[in-house]
Image (cartoon, coloured by chain):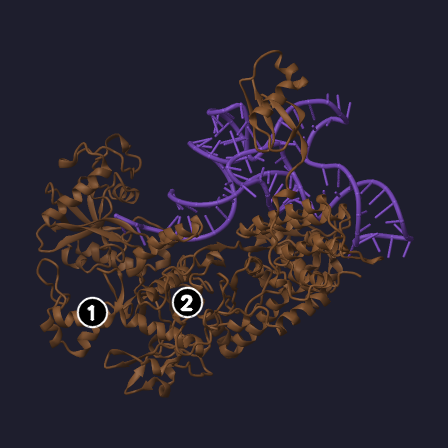
Chain colours: A brown, B purple
RNA sequence: CCGGAUGUGGUGAAAUUGGUAGACACGUCAGACUUAGGAUCUGAUGCCGUAAGGUGUGGGGGUUCGAGUCCCUCCAUCCGGACCA
């Protein structure tokens, strides 16, 4: 009987399905464990071999934990709202709901092929009304909440209103600023619109005007993390700044807690680094400078107040309005010309070519400590959106300031003595200050605090923390997303009641944009007019649903709540989250914020969503090329291509064996085009060129898992993906080698059945040698699986099966336990053989065997001795030997005595690998 | 430029606290059984050398009886952020 993997896999997948073996209960005496994959966006391209890598890893771990006695939640779903489906609809005329549905069916079929243990009864789709009802509901909670700075948490907006009604909003000290501060009486006198505008300034989901990343080609705004080098992440279209009315999430209020939270989660260093860079916390001071002959003050932000005496000029961002008020008569023309120039430059140009540009305004700021007059310049290298949009330039300490000073011949003051060489700036904090008045002789880092205290006392500045992170743009001018549960009346955003949810996404056939950059929904007049107002016509961005989906899996059918407190208390944090690094600053930050917010409202009991995060590496494609001679249908082999003038053409990797092209298949490929191709061979072969690239259909380097599953079976495919190397590592795909894993499974099969003899497994008692092999394997597999070293895990199985084959061990006692170990890695074949051995219940509920030390101990063995690490001999020592016994045996040994030539050894080191080192 | 990660055979890679480097697999070579084999099995396989032996984890230096592993320094590759004051 041979290993008929196709029949076996089909049989067990059906059986598991019928018997609902993967359904998990929220009620169990077992401890819980939550294993989560980043749910996929169901694209039309289907899965390639890179996608299931993380899923297989999590599947193995989930099954392993189940065998270990945990109640394991391992769900899957689809992030089914988003831009590409809509783009596809516009280009091909297929409604997003339809194409998304098709894609999901296709994904599901492909996933099922691999034999995952997902509990599909808990599947979520972000585009389903019973899901997005709760996305809208959470949005309303965000809208109806504000961030309290004293309690450092979100509170209901009603508390803020109550505060305004009793105490107003007055400054802690100093006079109230009109437009910002008001008394309770004033509050009561405000119109509804005024009140609404004031509250909007504190809501966690708010509507405001702001510079947004506008992508003309996509017809929508993008969040900062969706823009890469001035072009859109999806599609690579140019992105420009544009002022629009937008919804935002006030994620900046959570900046500190998002940063602190990183300390208590198990993420990789680089992941934490990426997130904290994105948040970009810096601390320093804001300092006011008087402006000569002007009532205005110039406020700058600096992280280095200690360099205050090294300030040689000021630079303000061209966008700041004060530019026009401070420019001198003489400089007016120059300034206006410069402003026009800046306006003409796109964001992209500014990013791409970093020219040193700027102009003197003619105005001077006064150094508050020594009265020095400092020229004020404007330059595009200072960003209006960060800090105060103005800086104090210290050319001896900051390279950009230095280059600017050199370019415009501004004299440079040196405050750091020999640390500054005149060639480049030195940003050290360890120099001793010179030319610095009252802080002369101090170490720079100590001076920072002293200067801040000083300016605070003088009332000319404050200590200040800044973040690079901006509030997240939360609206899109698109169709295929969650509608907002908001109705506008007289300029006031009115939230809908819970009973009015979900706001269903109305069906539309024509998805052309509405007027004035609004989304397609704007064209639906009937839908838009609602309750004597108009609905918000933007939709939520792709990350809305994914910010909380992991909670919905816990309680997917609840129609009263997004997730009951009982369910979220039971499952708690995601114990293990697996996904790619590409979500480092988007999804991962947003979902962390939503979790903290829901925690603040007491709706869940934990404030970090993920306990441990694993990043799977990207599987790249290994592309193959053929070289066509110009103007002909001749193809020249790689080694000879330099003798001709050729075009490099991607060729389907599936018709190339290693680097050798199957020329007959090539002729058939792309019917018509290469039918009469001729080949110039080397050594009778056509050799292809090789390059590692991103896996993509257009490069013909994708490998479809379905083909491999068809050819070798799901178990082989699963194990091979793991065998490739560590899960976290990126690597190019190479199908060569899958045979080795397949051979292993066939070898395993032969421990049960022989092709000629039939059944070979028996119920004889296992010998110590056989048990030793088994227990070594149990121990190793447990360790490998626990520390996510699935590649060595696969190797461990191979070694075990090789050993058992050598021992001719066909004993049930041994094989049965081996199958349980193997079940997470190769579930189908394990299940089959498990039943062959006469077990009725599924192997899924077996329990992971325990290894016994007794079988791992060596009885006696020869151990090497090294003298001064040079020469070696072997001694036979018993196990559990004491240091003294070792020394005695070593000293009695003839060879050792001969080496020592009568000298006494300084020390005898007996180490754990049983090696003995004698030092003379 | 800054930050993070990674450098080990022809290839993918092991080596958990410093302890016989290269497990396991691919590939290659030789052999067995075969009408045949791109099936199966057995053996060999880091490099130099017929051999004894030497040498070897990106380069250089250090700590140690002992370093792939720890420290310093340089180089290369990959990823991320880059005018953030």
Specify the subunit that label 1 lies on. Answer: A
CA separation, marks 2 and 1? 29 Å
| Residue at x 11% of width, y 56% of height | A296
Mark 2 residue element: helix
* Dot 2: chain letter: A
Between disc 2 and disc 1, whose residue precedes?
A: 1
* Quadrant (top left, top right, bottom left, bottom right) of the C terminus of chain A: top right
Please tell me whether residue A452 is drawn above or below residue A13 in the rendered image: above
Instruction: Give coordinates of residue A361: x percent, y percent.
Output: 18, 52
The residue that mark 1 highlights is A160
Check disc 2 and report the residue beneath it: A568
Q: Residue at x 53, y 73 (%)?
A: A121
Position in image of residue A456 (x %, y %): 13, 48
Query: Helix, strand, or loop for circle 1?
Result: helix
Quadrant of res A275: bottom left
Q: Residue at x 54, y 58 (%)?
A: A65
């Amino acid at each position: 009987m041979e290993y008929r993997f196709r029949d076996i896999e089909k049989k067990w997948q059906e059986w598991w399905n019928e018997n609902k073996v993967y359904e998990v209960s929220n009620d169990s005496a077992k401890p819980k464990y939550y294993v989560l994959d980043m749910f996929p966006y169901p694209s039309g391209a289907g899965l390639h071999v890179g996608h299931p890598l993380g899923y297989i890893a999590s599947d193995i771990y989930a099954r392993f934990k189940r065998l270990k006695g945990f109640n394991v939640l391992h769900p899957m779903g689809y992030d089914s709202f988003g831009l590409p489906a809509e783009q596809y609809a516009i280009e091909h005329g297929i409604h997003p709901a339809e194409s998304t549905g098709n894609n999901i069916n296709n994904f599901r079929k492909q996933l099922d092929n691999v034999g995952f243990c997902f509990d599909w009864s808990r599947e979520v789709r972000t585009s389903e009304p019973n899901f997005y009802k709760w996305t809208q509901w959470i949005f309303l909670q965000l809208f109806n909440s504000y961030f309290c700075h004293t309690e450092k948490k979100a509170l209901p907006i009603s508390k803020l209103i109550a505060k305004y009604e009793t105490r107003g909003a007055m400054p802690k000290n100093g006079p109230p600023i009109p437009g910002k501060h008001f008394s309770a009486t004033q509050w009561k006198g405000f119109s509804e619109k005024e009140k609404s505008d004031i509250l909007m300034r504190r809501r966690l989901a708010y509507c405001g005007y702001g510079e947004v990343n506008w992508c003309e080609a996509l017809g929508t705004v993008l969040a900062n993390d969706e823009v890469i080098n001035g072009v859109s992440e999806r599609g690579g279209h140019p992105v420009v700044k544009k002022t629009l009315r937008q919804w935002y999430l006030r994620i900046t209020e959570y900046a500190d807690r998002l940063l602190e939270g990183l300390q208590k989660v198990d993420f990789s260093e680089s992941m934490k680094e990426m997130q904290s860079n994105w948040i970009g916390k810096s601390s320093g001071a804001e300092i006011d400078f008087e402006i000569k002959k002007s009532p205005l003050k110039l406020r700058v932000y600096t992280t280095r107040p200690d360099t205050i005496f090294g300030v040689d000029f000021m630079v303000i961002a061209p966008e700041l309005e004060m530019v026009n008020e401070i420019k001198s008569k003489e400089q007016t023309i120059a300034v206006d010309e410069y402003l026009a120039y800046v306006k003409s430059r796109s964001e992209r140009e500014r990013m791409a070519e970093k020219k040193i540009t700027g102009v003197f305004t003619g105005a001077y700021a006064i150094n508050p400590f020594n009265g020095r007059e400092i020229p004020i310049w404007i330059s595009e290298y200072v960003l209006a959106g960060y800090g105060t949009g103005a800086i104090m330039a210290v050319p001896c300490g900051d390279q950009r300031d230095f280059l600017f000073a050199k370019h415009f011949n501004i004299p440079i003051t040196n405050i750091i003595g020999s640390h500054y060489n005149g060639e480049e700036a030195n940003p050290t904090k360890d120099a001793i200050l010179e030319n610095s008045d009252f802080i002369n002789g101090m170490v720079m880092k100590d001076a920072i605090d002293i200067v801040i205290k000083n300016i605070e006392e003088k009332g000319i500045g404050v200590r200040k923390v800044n973040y690079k992170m901006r509030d997240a743009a939360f609206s899109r001018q698109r169709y295929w997303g969650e509608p907002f549960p908001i109705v506008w009346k007289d300029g006031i955003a009115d939230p809908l009641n819970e009973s009015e949810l979900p706001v269903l996404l109305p069906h539309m056939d024509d998805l052309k944009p509405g007027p004035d950059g609004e989304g397609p929904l704007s064209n639906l007049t009937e839908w838009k007019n609602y309750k004597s107002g108009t609905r918000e016509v933007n939709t939520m961005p792709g990350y809305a649903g994914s910010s909380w989906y992991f909670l919905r899996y816990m309680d997917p059918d609840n129609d009263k709540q997004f997730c009951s407190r009982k369910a979220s208390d039971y499952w708690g944090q995601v114990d293990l989250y697996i996904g790619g690094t590409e979500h480092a600053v988007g999804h991962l930050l947003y979902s962390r914020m939503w979790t903290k917010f829901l925690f603040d409202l007491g709706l869940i009991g934990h404030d970090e969503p993920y306990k441990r995060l694993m990043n799977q590496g990207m599987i790249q494609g290994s592309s193959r090329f053929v070289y066509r001679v110009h103007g002909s249908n001749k193809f020249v082999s790689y080694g000879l291509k330099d003798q001709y003038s050729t075009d490099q053409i991607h060729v389907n990797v599936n018709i190339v064996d290693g680097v050798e092209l199957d020329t007959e298949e090539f002729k058939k490929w792309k019917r018509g085009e290469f039918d009469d191709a001729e080949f110039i061979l080397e050594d009778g072969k056509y050799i292809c060129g090789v390059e590692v690239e991103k896996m993509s259909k257009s490069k013909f380097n994708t490998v479809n898992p379905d083909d491999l599953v068809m050819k070798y079976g799901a178990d082989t495919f699963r194990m091979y993906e793991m065998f490739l190397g560590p899960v976290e590592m990126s690597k190019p795909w190479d199908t060569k080698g899958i045979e080795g894993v397949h051979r292993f499974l066939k070898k395993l099969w032969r421990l049960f059945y022989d092709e000629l003899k039939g059944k070979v497994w028996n119920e004889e008692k296992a010998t110590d040698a056989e048990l030793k092999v088994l227990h070594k394997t149990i121990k190793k597999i447990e360790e490998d699986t626990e520390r996510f070293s699935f590649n060595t895990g696969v190797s461990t199985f191979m070694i075990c099966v090789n050993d058992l084959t050598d021992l001719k061990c066909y004993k049930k006692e041994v094989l049965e336990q081996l199958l349980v170990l193997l079940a997470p890695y190769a579930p189908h074949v394990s299940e089959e053989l498990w039943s062959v051995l006469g077990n009725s219940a599924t192997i899924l509920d077996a329990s992971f065997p325990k290894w016994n030390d007794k079988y791992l101990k060596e009885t006696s063995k020869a151990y090497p001795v090294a003298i001064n690490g040079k020469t070696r001999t072997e001694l036979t020592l018993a196990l559990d030997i004491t240091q003294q016994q070792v020394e005695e045996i070593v000293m009695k040994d003839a060879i050792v005595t001969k080496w020592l030539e009568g000298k006494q050894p300084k020390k005898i080191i007996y180490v754990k690998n049983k090696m003995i080192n004698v030092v003379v």
